[in-house]
Amino acid sequence: MKRILSIIGAIGLTATSTTTLISCEKSEKPNDNNKINKPTTPTPKAQQPPKDSNWKLIINTTGQENSGKTYIGIFGNKPNVNITSWKGIEGEGLWHLYQYKAIYRWDGVGEPQIPTIDKNTGEITDWKEQKGTK
């Protein structure tokens, strides 16, 4: 049993160190100042919906009313951003927010149009707000 645990631990450490090396890869393309670009880290910060929007950013699921609401979730990192949408089901338990870059809930009336989301960056480019649904 100890041997299996040590093997699993070694695999985990190897995967972690490899991921760190890959994320620190140096870019050789010069920028406007003719200097070597520094690597950029992806920002896990979610976009805020526009002011007075029917889309609401979900920060935690405690006390959220799931039933009948439409949700969209964005997860993954560049260039593999995944987008999913679902209807909340009454009695559905808590979700694991750590898996998502962002989760948004539609609080308007009727079925929403899903916002336009850049599949490469996960950035919402058009919120597609329906007028008169507040």
Image: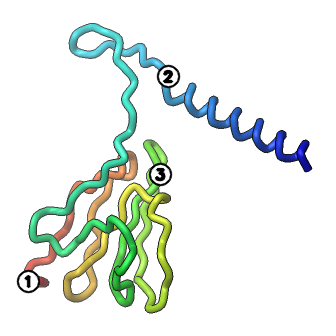
| Contact (Cβ within 8 Å) of mark 1 with mark 3 | no
Circle 3 is placed at which residue position? 76
**Callout 1: helix, strand or loop?**
loop
Name of the residue lying farthest toward the top: 34
Disc nearer the start of the sequence (1/3) = 3
Up/down of 117 relative to 104, above or below: above
Q: Residue at x 63, y 30 (%)?
A: 18
User: In the picture provided, is 9 more to the left or to the right than 15?
Assistant: right
Up/down of 3 relative to 22, above or below: below
What is the distance, in whole Å, between disc 1 and disc 3 at their CAs?
A: 33 Å
In the foreground, 117 or 75: 75
In the foreground, 28 or 4: 4
What is the distance, in whole Å, between disc 2 and disc 3 at their CAs?
A: 19 Å
| Contact (Cβ within 8 Å) of mark 2 with mark 3 | no
Circle 2 is placed at which residue position? 25
Q: Amino acid at mark 1?
A: Gly
Q: Residue at x 22, y 10 (%)?
A: 33
Circle 1 is placed at which residue position? 132
Using a 10 Å C-alpha cutoff, classify the residue at mark 1 as few (fewer than 14 neighbours), some (14 to 19) or many (20 or more).
few
